[in-house]
Amino acid sequence: MSVSSAQLELGYRRCAREVRAAAGNFYYAFRLLPPEKRRALHALYRFCRGADDIADAPEAAGLRLRRLDSYRSTLERSLAGYPPDSGWLILVDTAGRFSLSPEHLNQVIDGCAADCRPLRIRSERELADYCYGVAGVVGLLSARIFRYRDPRVETLAVDLGEAMQRTNILRDLGEDLAAGRRYLPEEVMDRFQLSAEDLLVGARGPNATRYRDLMAHEVALARERFRSGLQLVPLVERDARGCPAALAALYQALLDRIEQDGYDVQGQRVRLSSRHKLGLALVAWASATLRP
């Protein structure tokens, strides 16, 4: 594969525009990375987003699974030296520069495939496995871009990814249930004596107290994963430390907002303002970068 620097530059610039338009919380965390690492994370985000968009498309499960199979085939062809367009070209360039594992890239697609069918999580172990596929493995890939030497980073990156995914699950509880996906484990629902119908009405339903107790339990578990995952910050290269710190700050602020709203996530989507996100990201970046 013969590629000019101009082709790569054009591909990375297009990708940056896409990320700015679609990445939300991630854009603020990526912004202050040095150019090479920022562009690499943009390419990785675009790849993950592409798989996720296929899984979330309003189409029959079988069609979405076939499209993910095609996406996987395109990944394999691209890594073999035949990327079909600039988006795949920059992913190949990033994978080469940062030694991204093809196995991990394929596991991202595996994780998204789980969302193509009605999903019922039975246990905390199953939830951890699901979170690994859609978020923990992305943490591993991101850590390669941050660069590190301490092998503990790999476990911590998975924990940080799980913490963020658990936050997404709580924020999107109502819309996921409406789409046939119940991520809160059945064993936990049984412990709090709640049904799927109770989760649909949440804090406004007849079992609001038990619902809030379950949500408080799940928020505490997410925070526990954040405490573990954040230990990777001083273990990655200094110029990248602000990125995981900023992401954690943004997602922990979402947990705070969920609590402040009394866990009423079924009505209005929990959001942070752009100004709030920018402030959180800047403070996290400064703290993580300046610490010894």
Image: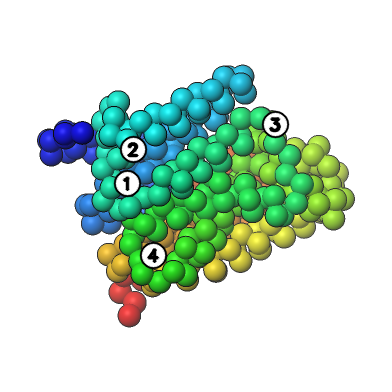
Q: In what quadrant of the picture does the N terminus appear?
A: top left
Name the secondary structure under disc 2.
Answer: helix
- Does residue 63 lie above or below 112 as drawn? above
Label 3 with label 4: CB-CB less than 8 Å: no
Please state the horizontal and vertical placement of residue 270, each as a whole percent of the image: 56, 45
Q: Which residue is mark 1?
A: 95
> Disc 2 vs disc 3: which is toward the camera?
2
Q: Is residue 216 left or right of residue 292?
A: right
Amino acid on which the number 2 mark rests in the picture: Leu
Amino acid on which the number 3 mark rests in the picture: Pro
Q: Residues within 10 Å of mark 2 (few under 14, many from 20)?
A: some
- The alpha-carbon separation of the residues under discs 4 and 2 comes to 35 Å
Q: Earlier in the sequence, mark 4 or mark 2?
A: 2
Label 2 with label 1: CB-CB less than 8 Å: yes
Please state the horizontal and vertical placement of residue 190, each as a whole percent of the image: 85, 50
Q: Earlier in the sequence, mark 3 or mark 4?
A: 3
Q: Earlier in the sequence, mark 2 or mark 3?
A: 2
- The alpha-carbon separation of the residues under discs 3 and 4 comes to 37 Å
Q: Which residue is mark 4?
A: 284
Residue at x 26%, y 43% (from the top left corner): 93
- The alpha-carbon separation of the residues under discs 2 and 3 comes to 32 Å
Q: Nearer the viewer, residue 47 or 178?
A: 47
Where residue 278 sits, quadrant-wise, is: bottom left
Q: Which residue is mark 2?
A: 79
Count of numbered tags: 4
Residue at x 39%, y 58% (from the top left corner): 143
> Disc 1 vs disc 3: which is toward the camera?
1
Q: Is residue 226 left or right of residue 126?
A: left
Q: Residues within 10 Å of mark 1 (few under 14, many from 20)?
A: many
Please state the horizontal and vertical placement of residue 15, each as a whole percent of the image: 29, 36
